[in-house]
Image (cartoon, coloured by chain):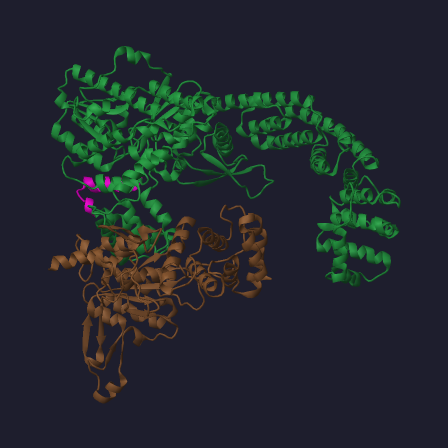
Chain colours: A green, B brown
Amino acid sequence: METDTAIESTPLVKIFGVRHLSPMGAWQLRRFLDEVKPTAVLIEGLADAGDLIADITRRDTKLPIAVLAYTQSPPVRTLVYPLARYSPEYQALCWATEHDVHVDFIDLPSDVFLALQDLRYREPVEHEPVEPDPAANDPDEPVPPENTPPENTLPENISPDNAPSDNAPSDNASPGNTSAPGKLERLGPENRISLYTQVATKMGEADYESYWERNFEHNRSTNSYRLACLEFGRGLRELDQGLPLGYAENLVREAFMRRRIVETIAAGHDPEKIVAIVGAYHASALTHQQAAMTDDELASLKRLPSKLTLMPYSYFKLSSQSGYGAGNEAPAYFELIWDALESQRLSEVPMRYLTMVARDLRRVGTHRSTAEVIEGVRLARTLSAMKDGMAPTLRDLQDAAVTVIGHGERSSIQEALARVEVGTEIGSLPAGVSRTSIQDDFDRELERLKLVKYRTAVKQDLALDLRENRQAKSEASAFLDLHRSSWLHRLSLLGVQFGMPARTRQDAATWAENWILQWSPEVEIALVESVLLGETVELAASFKFKTMLDECDSIDGASAAVSLACKCGLFDSLELARARLQELATDCTAFVAIAHAANELAMVIRYGDVRRFDPQPLVPLVDQLFVQGSLALFATANCDNNAAALATVGMEELNRVSQEYHDIVDETLWIEQLKRLSDSDDRNPLLSGYACSILLERSLMDSAQLAREVSRRLSPGIPADLGAGWFEGMSKRNRYALLARQALWEQLADYVSSLDDEQFKRALVFLRRAFGNFSPAEKRSIAENLGQYWGVAADNLSELLEQPMTEKEEAALNDLNDFDFGDV
Amino acid sequence: MAKKAVATDSNTPSTSPSGMSEPDDASNVASNTSVLRQPAEELFAHELDELIKADKHPKPTGWKMSPRSVLTYIVGGKCGNLTITPKYVGHDRLVEIAISTLVTDRALLLIGEPGTAKSWLSEHLSAAINGDSTKVVQGTAGTTEEQIRYTWNYAMLIAHGPSQQALVKSPIFRAMEAGAIARFEEITRCASEVQDAMISLLSEKRISVPELANEIPAQKGFSVIATANTRDRGVNDMSAALKRRFNLIVLPTPAKIETEIEIVTNRVRELASNLDLRAELPAADVVEKVVTIFRELRTGQTLDGKNKLKTSSGVLSTAEAISLLANSMALAGNFGTGTIGDDDIAAGLQGSVVKDEEKDKVVWSEYLNNVMKKRGAQWRGLYKSCSEHNA
C-alpha cells in the first residue's frame, strides 16, 4: 500500500509528527519553528475550525479548552478536540500568531468527520468484524467520541443524557487529543491494546505510557523528537494493517491533508517554509509520491451538517481517571514538565513532583519529611537508571512515592497523587467567544442567579430556601432561591449534570432544597447538545418536557410529570401535563396508581404556595382522581394478600388526601367506601381490617361498634386466617387507638381461648405476624390490658411474656414450621 | 588453559566454588545431600556464576553483579544459553523497586502477611548481591541489643580485658565491615527498644565500640534487608523514626490464581528433590484444588465472586499451601501408595484451615458443604475425605 512506498519518498513540506498533548513535542516544535521560520503553519485539525484560531489564541482564553463539533440535527454526533497549554498544536497556533504567519487546520472538515463517525455507528451492525475500533488505527485522529461501543444504540436518541458518554471518548479527538497511541490503547479493542503493550514490552516497559515518556518526553536534543516520531509512526503503520474501516478512514484523511498542503503551496508559500504538524502516525504519509484528494473525491464524501464551538475543558476530563479514555493520564504532571521545559529546569521535575506530593499530604495532616522526598528522588532515579532512562518517568515517581512517602501503601497517598497528577484546572473562555445560544443563556442565568462562583470542578453544596425573603428589596432577590431551584431542575431535566439534588434533612419541608453543584466539561457538552431542543435552557426544557409527556402512557408517569413541571417552574407545561394526566386518568381504574397520582398532585398543590403558582387548575383533577380512587377501592379489595399490601399504601395515600383537602374532595364518599369495605365479609380481610382501623382512628366508630365488629370477625367458626388476617390489617395503623380499647383485647382473649387446637395453630401464625412489629412497650401495654382482664398483676404477666422461650416451647414452635397452611 | 577451564565449566553445571556438588540432571539446582537446607547462593550457584560472567553493566561498589542481573536472577529470564529460574513470580516491579532501594544504600523493609515470600526474597536478594545470604539476625521477642551490635567472649574479656579478639561481632557488624547486605528477619518481633538500636546504625552508618575506643564506619555496599509481619500475634509496631529509615515494600499475595499455582508447583518440585520425598509430584489438578481452597478461604469469597464465605483464623498463605503439598507427599510416600490421594490432602487441609478448633471447624464444614460439595464429581473424593477428617 501507499505506506510502504512512502518510506523512501520525499515529504511534501516540512513535517513535524507529534503525539497530541506532549510537552516535549510542544517544546521541540517551537524550537523547530524558530529554526525553520515558516511562512505557513498547517495543523492537523478540523479544516472548518480555522475561524476559531483567533479565539483559541486570545490572551484571556485560559486552557484547557476544546473544540467541539456537533451535528445540527439528530442523531447527535459530537467530536471533541481538547487542547492544553502543552499541546504541540496549541503552541504552534501561538507561535504562528506571535509571528503573524499563515496558520490553518488541514484535516477533514467537521461535517465529513461526523459523517464518517456516523458510519462507524452503523457499520458494526452490518458486519461484526469491523468492530475493532477504527479509532484505534489512527493515533491522532480526532476520534469521534465514539469509541464507545458500537452497540451503542443511541444514534437516534436526542436525549442529551447520552451526550456526555458520547463525547467522552471523543476526547480522543485529535488535536488535543492525547497521545495518539495512548488513546488508542485505551479506546481500542483488546487486540489493539496488546499491539501497543507489545511495543512497550519489547522495550522492557510495563506499559505504553512509560515507554512513551521515557523515550520521548525527556530528550531535549535537537530534532530527536521529530525524527523519533517519524520512525515511530512508520513502525505503527507497518504494524497496523487490516482494520478496513479505520484504516481506510486514515487514508481519506491523509489524502485530504495532502490536498490542503498542495493548496497552500499553490497559494505561493515555499514548501521549505511550510511546516505541517500532524500525529506521528500520519507523519510519513504526507509525501509527493501519494496522491492528493481530487475535487471529485472530495465531493463524493458524505457530510452531516455541523457546527463548531469552543468550550472550556478540565484536566480532570483530560485524565483517564475521569473514566473516559482520552487525554493524558496525568495532565497536571505533563504541565509540570512543560513549565520545567520552558524554564530550563527539566531535571527538577522529580523533586517538584515528590515535593508536591509530600506537601499535599502535609496539608491534610499527614507529616512527611523533606528527607523522605530526597530519598524518593534517589529511588526514582535509580529505578529509571535500571531502564537506561534519562529521567524518571511518572511511573518511577509514583512507585518511589509509594515506597518512600507512602511507606509501602499506595492507598495512603492515592489522593495526593491524583491531585498532583491530574489537578483541578479548568479552562475558561472570554465572554462572547464563539458559543451556542444556550451556552450564553447558561452564563447569563448563572450571573442572574448569582451562581457564578459554583462554576468550578470542585463540588460545592448549595442550600436553598424557596420562601420569599422578606428583607429583599426587589422581587428577583426575594425569590432568588426559588428561581435557582427551578433553573437547576430544568438543567437536570435536560441531563445537564451541573447540580445534583442532595438529601434534605427535613423531609417534610416543602421550602428546603439541597443541591451539590459541580461544573465539568460534560456539563458544557450536554448543554451544547441541548441546543437542538431549544435556544435557551427554558425553551429546551419545555421541549424536552413535551416530548417526555407525549411518550408517557401511564398515570404514574403523568403525575410525576406534573410535579416535575412544577419544580422546573414550567407553568405552561404544567397545564399540558395536567391535561395529559386527566386524559389518562379517565380510563384508569387501577386503585393504587390513582391513589398515588392523587397524592402526588396534592403534594404539588401544597408546593403551590412556595413555588408561587396558582394550583387552582389542579384542584378539580385531584377531586376527580379522588372520586375515581374511592370508587375503585371496593373492587380492588377483592385481591390476595400480596396485592393487599400495595393497596394499603394506596389507602393510606387517599386517606391523607381526604384529610388534608377535605374542603375540596368528597370526603363523605371516601368514608362511605371505607365503611362498606370494613363491613363486608367477602373482601380481603386484611383490607377490611385496615379500613376499620382508619375509621377507628378518625373516630367514626365507637367502642360499642368496635366490640361488635371484633366479636363478629373473631367469632368461633370463622376460619382463623380470616379472623386473624383482619386483626392484622387492623393493627397496621394507629396502635394506640387499639391499645386504648380494653374491649378489643377482651374479645381477642375470648376468641383465642375459644379456638380448638388446630384452629389455634392457624391463628397463632397470623397473630404472631400481626404483633411481630409491635414494640416491647406496646407489647407491655397489651399485657396490661390482658392482665386486667384476667385479673393477674400486669407485672407478673409481662415478666412471663418476656421470658425467653424454654426449649420445649421452642420445639413446639419449630413444629409449627411444618404445619401445612394449605392455601394461606 | 584458562580458556579451556571456562569452556568445561559451562558444560558441567556443577561448578559451585566449593566444588562439592554433583552434576545434577539438567536442573540448575545443585543438591547437597547432607545439609537439610542450603542457602540460596549454594543452591543456585550455577545461575549466579553465569550471570556474573555474562554481566556487562556496571556493578555498584560491593556488589557481585549489576542491578539488572540481580533482577534477572530473581524474576527469571535468559542468560546466554542458561534459563534462569524465576525465584519470585508475579510482581516484577516490586523486585525492581527493592533492588533500586539497595542501590541507593537505603535499607529495605519487606512487609506482608505470613507466607508472602518475604524471607525468600530477602535471601535471594542478598545471595545475588553478595553471594552470601547468611548474615542474618533472626528477630525474636528475646533478641537483645547485643545481638544487633556486638557482644563479648566473656572468658577472654575477663582474662585480657576488652580487645579485638574478645569482640564477638553481630552479623550486622560484619556486614558493615565487609560492605555487604545484612538481613534482619522478623524485625517486628523484637522489643521496640531493641528495634531502635537500628536507628542510629542506619542513619550514621557506623558502629561505635566505646570499650575499644573506636568506631567502625560501614563500607560502601552495606545495607539491611529487614522483614516484618503485618498479621500475627506478638508483633511490636515499629517506631516512626525507624520506619523512616527504611523503604517499605508491601509484598502482596499472588494476584492471579495462575501465578499462585505456578509458584506452588515450582516450589513443591524443588522441595521434593531437596528433601527426597519419595512420592510422585502432585498432579496439576491437585495443586489447583489446594490453591483454590486457600484463595477462597483467604479472600472470603469464591473465585467467581458469587458466594461470600467466612474466613478462617489461619493465614492460608502460599507458603502454607506449599508445605501442605510437601507434607502430603511425605505422607503418601511413607505411609501411602506413593501418589497423593484425597485423604493425604484432606489431612493437610484440616491442619491448615482448622487452627482455632471451634470456630474454624464451622468455617471449614460450611465451606465443604456449601462450596465444595456443589462442585461436581471432580471434587467429590476430596469432599468426602475432608468431611471425614472434619467430623
Rendered view: B115 above or below B302? below
x, y percent for residue A72: 40, 18
Within the image, what quadrant is residue B2 found in?
bottom left
- Depth check: give the residue in front, A399 or A355: A399
Within the image, what quadrant is residue A808 found in?
bottom right
x, y percent for residue B17: 21, 65
Within the image, what quadrant is residue B327 found in?
bottom left
Horizontal side of B303 relative to A91 (left or right) equals: right
Residue that extends furthest to the bottom in the rendered view of this protein: B159
x, y percent for residue A43: 23, 25
Horizontal side of B342 relative to A688 (left or right) equals: left
Rendered view: A503 above or below B116? above
Horizontal side of A601 relative to B15 (left or right) equals: right
Residue that extends furthest to the left in the rendered view of this protein: B1
Specify the quadrant that holds the C terminus of chain B.
Answer: bottom right
Determine if residue A51 is in view: no
Rendered view: A367 above or below A134? below
- Depth check: give the residue in front, A268 or B297: B297
x, y percent for residue A794: 80, 60
How many numbered dots are placed on residues in this image?
Answer: 0
Name the residue at 82% across, 55% down. Answer: A786
Residue that extends furthest to the front in the rendered view of this protein: B337
- Depth check: give the residue in front, A806 or A536: A806
Determine if residue A29 is in view: yes
Specify the quadrant that holds the N terminus of chain B.
Answer: bottom left
> The magenta stretch spans which residues?
A331-347
Is the stretch drawn in magenta largely helix, strand or loop?
helix
Residue A49 among magenta residues: no
